[in-house]
Amino acid sequence: MYTQAMDLIAKEAGNTTPATAEPEAYQREFDAKIDRGDFIEPKDWMPEGYRKTLIRQISQHAHSEVVGMLPEGNWITRAPTLKRKAILLAKVQDEGGHGLYLYAAAETLGVSRTELIEALLSGKAKYSSIFNYPTLTWADVGVIGWLVDGAAIMNQIPLCKCSYGPYARAMVRICKEESFHQRQGYESLLVMMREGTPEQKAMVQDAVNRWWWPALMMFGPPDSESVHSPQSMRWGIKRVSNDELRQKFVDATVPQAEVLGVTLPDPHLKWNPERGHYDFGPINWKAFWDVINGHGPCNRDRMAARRRAWEEGAWVREAAEAYAEKAKRRATTHPTAA
Ligand code: FAQ
């Protein structure tokens, strides 16, 4: 397969402590690197919990990117103009690319692509709650760019400084592309709000009403219920907490909504001069956990689409493996022919 080189790294990466060395010395060196803010690289020793946490987070992030292609992909054939279609195609393709960088980053931790995909398909691994909502109108595409990519960037900028080198480096490129995604969404909404008919403006407002609260949920449960945050922050995997990022997102988005001329669907949204932040209303966490546990409006459709893609792609994986095998045989029997 194309990722064979990554498989080799994964095998070499091994997380084993050499029998001759004291495990404490490895732990001390790892802790010192984290304290200095150095990157941990695939061949470095790392605690098993750190490796597992990274595999969980990076693979869930990769799955989110790939499942995230589905809601917008739904509109590629119905984009209103050639320009919008070209932009949407490029955006959805970028998301596939993000999934690939992230799967490759996860593979450096000693797990195979097949294992990662199987964890998604069996329901063991999660993907972002946000992609379990339907895209009912063209305005949803603009609102996903503005709010969903906007929330994704807010969450992902600190990940560019994550302590694990391959993840941090993948995030730098991903964030640059997410920034284009956010801007194209916002620009398409501006056009609809400034030049559109009353029906088109109402369509934008309706999409904002449906996506606002799910976008706030993307940052994860409140800090008090975020089981992984304390350890992930100590390891430098997460740099900013779920609640802090959510607040930063609200603070950045309210003025943008004013420029657009849409109302955010929260009667409690109000500038608080003492805190220097916008206050916002309570989030329906039961609805969030329902979606995560498989009961959102589109969970079944999303998983069925991913399962179908995996099954229909089996012949491509087999052909690539057969080709790689043949090339390897040729290289050993005719070393100079390569
Ligand atoms: N959805 O203890 P915490 C994008 C789970 S990419 C589903 O706080 P953690 C680009 C969490 O996994 C969007 N599950 O967890 C795009 C854990 O369950 P577990 C994805 C969620 O890891 C745009 C449990 O709840 N971005 O949008 C969610 O410390 C447009 C307890 O939570 C990333 O993945 C959720 N929203 O913090 C693509 C960024 N929130 O694993 C297409 C990287 C929490 O024990 C179109 N990930 N859970 O079974 C992160 O930053 C973190 O993993 C968090 C969660 C912040 C998501």
Image: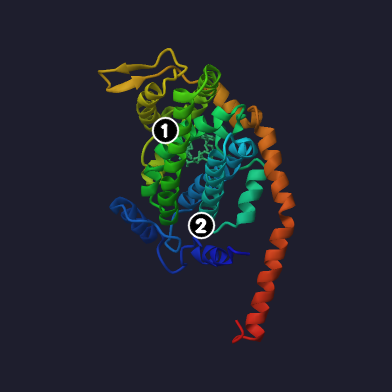
| Relative depth, front residue between 221 and 132 | 132
* Badge 2 amino acid: Leu
Q: Is residue 79 visible?
A: yes
The residue depicted at 55 percent of the width and 44 percent of the height is 86
Nearest the viewer among 122 and 228 is 122
Q: Residues within 10 Å of mark 1 (few under 14, many from 20)?
A: many
Question: Tag 2's secondary structure?
Answer: loop
Q: Determine if the C-beta at disc 1 is less than 8 A from ligand 1.
A: yes
SS for dot 1: helix
Q: Position of residue 142 (x, y in %)?
A: 51, 32
- Residue holding disc 1: 242
- Front residue of this view, candidates 270 and 209: 209
- Residue 147: horizontal and vertical position, in percent? 46, 31
Which class describes the residues within 10 Å of circle 2: few (<14), some (14-19), or many (20+)? many
Q: Position of residue 76 (x, y in %)?
A: 61, 39
Residue at 67% x, 79% y is 329
- Which residue is at a point 61% across and 51% down the rendered structure image? 116
Residue type at mark 1 is Asn
Q: Earlier in the sequence, mark 2 or mark 1?
A: 2
Where does label 2 land, which residue?
109
Number of labels in the image equals: 2
Mark 2–mark 1 Cα distance, whole angstroms, equals: 25 Å
Q: Residue at x 57, y 37 (%)?
A: 81
Looking at this view, name the residue that lies furthest to the left: 274
- Measured along the vertical axis of the image, is residue 257 above or below residue 322? above
Instruction: Quarter of the image for the N terminus: give it.
Output: bottom right
